[in-house]
Image (tube, helix red, strand yellow):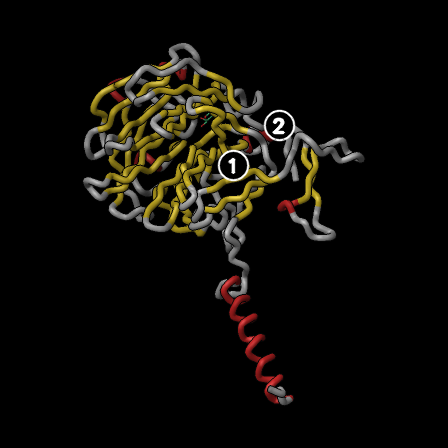
């Protein structure tokens, strides 16, 4: 059949329509690319879509519906408590501000205070979100208390239930964990930070039922982060050196209450200039990856908590009971697949003019793709 000029035009128009519709499916409503993977750049202060800094330091993440909700410290200029702020994301890259879920006016106890390492757990039996955190006065670390607040919605205004010393013990750096059987646990640094205590929580997660472990007594572990992988429980911790980063170590067990192994080193001598806040399991169609969320404290760089940067690194598991953490200047996250990968082979490339580690940003293969460099190893990754 001979194609007429107008027939050719019709075929071209149809082809264009198909191409535009294909393009449209790759672009979001505002014409922005909706990549399957999101790239997170480490050693930066993240910003929200409005361009404001994301202040969720020392934080933790809870999944509710299709969103990851990130809660963390948001401080006054003098480094005292201002808010616990909540953000949400589907891709772990774009964090939308939702609410200051605790403020100085939530309770008289919070008017002049210090709140660190807030962690939110969801209680499936009560339908409540329960926040545990470390509470101090605004001037020193002498109170050494845990505190609890609750909300019926994940990012609503939380109701303050009070602060206390668990079973009379000092309680500073803190984390929480919901086990596969629904049991809730709180882990905190006790005895002037020399020991780590593991407490089983009451059924509604708002109180202490019993102490189930006194871990690594006299070994001065802080910044606990607990997760379970393939029937093995991993407890990642830092040493106790104030705001300065140090060697992270971890132990393993076959149950939270069971016998825990001794501590093994992970990462380099300063956790690449960071301190763990939380380990987030990213579960998707291809499996589960474990993302270590760390803070590079502003206080260790001449600033305060709100000057801190984030260092988020994938954990890898050479065996079922061992784990490792390498540095990457950038990571990619695919929450649908459940994959988290490091970008860049930081041990292999060196920029000749600076002697620094170097790579192509975003692993771009384009001609003219931008290069990035950073101080190799520990404490000073700047991009
Ligand atoms: C280390 C802790 O992990 C932080 O949360 C904070 O309490 C600093 N110490 C204070 O020096």
Figure check: 82 above or below 321 = below
Quadrant that contains the N terminus:
bottom right
Decide: few, some or many residues near mark 2? Use Cα within 10 Å; few <14, some 14-19, many ≥20: some
Nearest the viewer among 339 and 244 is 339
Decide: few, some or many residues near mark 1? Use Cα within 10 Å; few <14, some 14-19, many ≥20: many
SS type, badge 2: loop
Q: Position of residue 273 (x, y in %)?
A: 57, 28
Write the residue at 41% across / 10% down: 218
Quadrant that contains the C terminus:
top right
Q: Position of residue 304 (x, y in %)?
A: 53, 33
Name which quarter of the figure residue 328 lies in.
Answer: top right
Give the residue furthest to the right.
Answer: 353
Nearest the viewer among 112 and 286 is 286
| In the image: residue 184, left or right of residue 83 | left
Write the residue at 49% across / 50% down: 94
Residue 173 visible here: yes
SS type, badge 1: strand
Figure check: 59 above or below 22 = above
| Label 1 C-beta lies within 8 Å of the nearest ligand 1 atom | no
Write the residue at 22% across / 21% down: 210
Residue that numbered label 1 is attached to: 312
Residue that numbered label 2 is attached to: 379
Figure check: 239 above or below 65 = above
Write the residue at 41% across / 40% down: 287
Cα–Cα span, label 1 and label 2? 15 Å
Count of numbered circles on the image? 2
Is tag 1's residue or tag 2's residue first in the polypeptide sequence? 1
Q: Position of residue 152 (x, y in %)?
A: 24, 46
Give the residue furthest to the front.
Answer: 1
């Amino acid at each position: 059949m001979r194609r007429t000029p107008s027939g050719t035009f019709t075929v071209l128009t149809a082809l264009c329509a198909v191409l535009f519709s294909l393009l449209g499916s790759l672009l979001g409503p505002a014409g922005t690319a909706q990549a399957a993977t999101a790239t997170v750049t480490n050693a930066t202060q993240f910003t929200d879509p409005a361009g404001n800094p994301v202040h969720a330091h020392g934080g933790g993440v809870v999944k509710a519906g299709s969103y990851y909700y990130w809660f963390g410290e948001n401080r006054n200029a003098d480094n005292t408590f201002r808010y616990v702020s909540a953000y949400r994301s589907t891709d772990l890259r774009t964090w939308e501000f939702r609410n200051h879920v605790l403020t100085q006016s939530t309770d008289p106890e919070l008017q002049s205070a210090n709140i660190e390492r807030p962690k939110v757990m969801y209680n499936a039996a009560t339908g409540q979100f329960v926040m545990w955190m470390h509470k101090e006065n605004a001037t020193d670390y002498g109170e050494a208390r845990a505190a609890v607040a609750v909300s019926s919605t994940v990012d609503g205004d939380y109701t303050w239930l009070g602060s206390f010393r668990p079973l009379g013990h000092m309680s500073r750096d803190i984390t929480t964990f919901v086990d596969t059987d629904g049991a809730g646990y709180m882990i905190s640094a006790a005895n002037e930070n020399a020991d780590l205590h593991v407490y089983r929580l009451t059924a509604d997660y708002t109180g202490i039922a019993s102490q189930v472990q006194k871990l690594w007594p006299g070994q001065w572990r802080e910044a606990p982060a607990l997760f379970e992988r393939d029937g093995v429980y991993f407890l990642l911790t830092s040493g106790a050196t104030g705001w300065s980063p140090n060697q992270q170590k971890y132990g393993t067990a076959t149950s939270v209450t069971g016998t825990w192994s001794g501590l093994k080193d992970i990462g380099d001598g300063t956790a690449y200039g960071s301190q763990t806040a939380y380990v987030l399991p990213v579960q998707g169609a291809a499996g589960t990856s474990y993302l270590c969320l760390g803070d590079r404290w502003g206080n260790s760089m001449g600033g305060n908590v709100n000057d801190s940067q984030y260092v988020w690194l994938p954990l890898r598991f050479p065996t079922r009971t061992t784990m490792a953490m390498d540095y990457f200047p950038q990571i990619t996250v695919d929450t649908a697949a459940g994959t988290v990968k490091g970008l860049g082979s930081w041990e292999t490339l060196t920029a000749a003019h600076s002697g620094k580690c170097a790579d192509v940003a975003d692993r771009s293969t384009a001609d003219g793709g931008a290069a990035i460099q950073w101080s190799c190893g520990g404490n000073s990754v700047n991009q």
